[in-house]
Image (cartoon, rainbow, N blue to C red):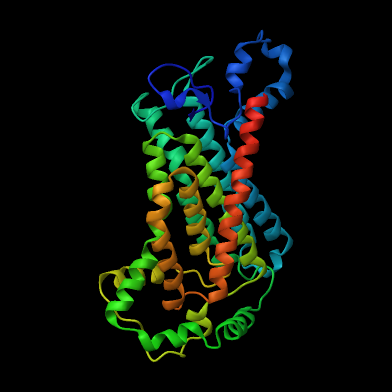
Amino acid sequence: MNTMDGARGQGYQKSELRAPWQHPVNAREHQARLPLPTRSDRGVGKILGTEVADVLGACGTFEWVALGYLAISSILIAIFAENLAHPLRLLSVQFLVALGIVALCRAEANVWTDGPQVREVGLGAGTLTQRFWHFWRHWYPHLFFLLCFEELGALVHLFSPRWQDAELIAFDQWLTGVQPSIWLEQFATAGRNELMQFAYLTYFVYLLVLGGILYYREDWHGYWSVMTYSAVAYAMGYVIAIFFPVESPWFAMAGSWHGPLHGGAFTTVINFIEHYGRVRGAAFPSEHVAGSFAALWGAWRHRRWLFWVMLPLVLCMCASTVWGRYHYVVDIFGGMVTGTLGYVIGKWLMKDSSQSTVES
């Protein structure tokens, strides 16, 4: 029952209320209710303040989480700059990403504004330009998550130069009595490996499928809630990875197996992704598991039937991360906790934002 900021009109029953992830009143709409002072009366400071308010007003809860992570990681880069080869380059990337997020939100808000009126939002409403910005405003989070993950390759030794794998190897040994990824090799066949790699590959579609369903149904509140759950989960995992660098069994235990895992098409696809997209480090907590659990809990809250479809796939995906030698068992538990916390905190943030909207 939610839609874009200030949306009014007929034809979209789900779009009668303002979305809780945006400010309750569009800045231009608010200004239209008041006598507009002349430029000379307002002064440069007031004009600048109004523009800043307009920009910030275009951002929602997801954006504040994303910008918060960028701010925290930028501060850490500045503090521990001596541990990095190109700290200024990383800071520049952080700034440009933050600027891009704000600019995208502002541009999307502007195209739906016609003077003091904010038009109704729906998949079939608006001009081609409006639908273009509306699409990218909703789907850029996936690119943001990918960029931040890839950036971790440069940040894993920001705080400590030493890998922490020994502690996790010892924990797995204490917990299971064996080294799970080595012990599982005795069961490896091409068919079993292909099944496991398929399970691992399903990670990449959980958020896309859930987000796609919510987007198609024009459930904007549900859509941004799910993105916020994921953003909180990923952000916590990224920060933990910076302070506790773990490179994974693939690197730390290299040479412990009799050979690579062979399979078919799914194995080939995963090997391609791992070859060109693998990040050395950031194994604890597992971001695959964290993101999957955030999406899983999002499905439980917003599309219960999809939860039951995803549940067995997510559990198999968790097992596949150990089977494929990508993670320790403790990484899986860490990802489960991080993903669940992302859901709990994200739900609270969305609820708090919704209450602020109603009160305003």
Vertical order, 4 against 136 (above or below): above
Residue closer to the observer: 23 or 225: 225
Query: Can see residue 8?
Result: yes
Q: Which quadrant: the C terminus?
A: top right
Residue pictured at 51% horizontal, 52% vertical: 297
Vertical order, 6 against 57 (above or below): above
Residue pictured at 43% horizontal, 62% vertical: 314
Percent coordinates x, y for residue 168 in the rendering? 61, 79
Q: Is residue 129 left or right of residue 344?
A: left
Percent coordinates x, y for residue 184 in the rendering? 42, 84
Percent coordinates x, y for residue 150 in the rendering? 50, 62
Q: Is residue 118 left or right of residue 73?
A: left
Query: Can see residue 51?
Result: no
Vertical order, 314 against 95 (above or below): below
Instruction: Count numbered badges in the picture.
Output: 0
Outermost residue, top side: 35
Residue pictured at 56% horizontal, 38% vertical: 102
